[in-house]
Amino acid sequence: MTNESLTVGQIFASHTDRLPAVKLPDLPRSGILVGQDSSGHIELAGDSVILPVDPDTRAELITDPVTRAWLLTEAFARTRRTYLWAVGELATERQHVQDARQDRERLLGDVRAFLVERVRDGQLDQQDANAFLRRHHLPAYAPRLRVAYTVTGEFEIDGEHDPEDGRLDHLIAVDLDGITNVDRGTERHQVQVTSTRIDVDHRPGHA
């Protein structure tokens, strides 16, 4: 359904709250008025193209909802297809970037593993390898060392109440505070206490 003929410019100016659907009987063509270009022409969208129309062109406003909906669909069908294509291209490009990033991470991981093995077998200096790894923002090779030690010693205690060996085991430990790079929580030690009576009276007044 259309109403009385007006001009394209009049219809566009009086419908600022929505996109009006119009019929141009002199062309003939129907479509949606979507805007105005810099030269003052009214932009008519139809059949997936946008045409500039002189504002004084005779036009009839289309008010039928079904016809208007169909014209809107036709007007923006190409826009929708372009949008969907662009979304698909963007998703594909993102996948390519992600795949490339993962390939690079795998390659750098393999390079790091190769350098570590060369350091371990003595073919490459550790400092040189770590300098390369840091330049490529990779973790430096930091091997852990397990240090085994043996400590022996003795001390004297009052033998009047001779303690059983096991009562001292948990009281004797090794002080590692002087070693600055000890990884706390990894300390392990085992104490075995043996005692020997020396039978010397150390108290004053006794020979």
Image: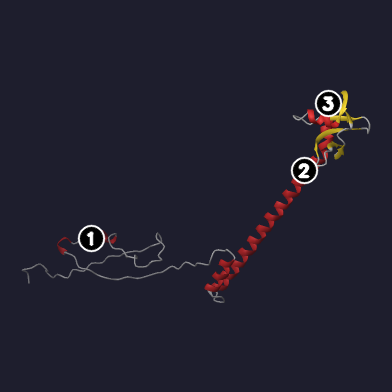
Q: How far apart are the two marked residues, 3 and 2, measured between alpha carbons?
A: 25 Å
User: How is this picture coloured?
Assistant: secondary structure
**Residue 93 percent coordinates (x, y):** 73, 52
Above or below, comparing residue 12 to residue 165 in the picture: above
Which residue is tagged 3? 66
- Taking 185 as reference, is 116 left or right? right
Amino acid type at mark 3: Val
N-terminal-most mark, 1 or 2: 2
Give the position of the N terminus as an image quadrant.
Answer: top right
Which residue is tagged 2? 84
Amino acid type at mark 1: Glu
Measuring 18% from the left and 68% from the top, which residue is drawn there? 197
Q: Nearer the viewer, residue 206 or 43?
A: 43
- Taking 77 as reference, is 105 left or right? left
Q: Which mark is residue 164?
A: 1
| Number of other residues with Cα within 10 Å of mark 1, as a class: few under 14, some 14 to 19, many 20 or more | few
Amino acid type at mark 2: Leu
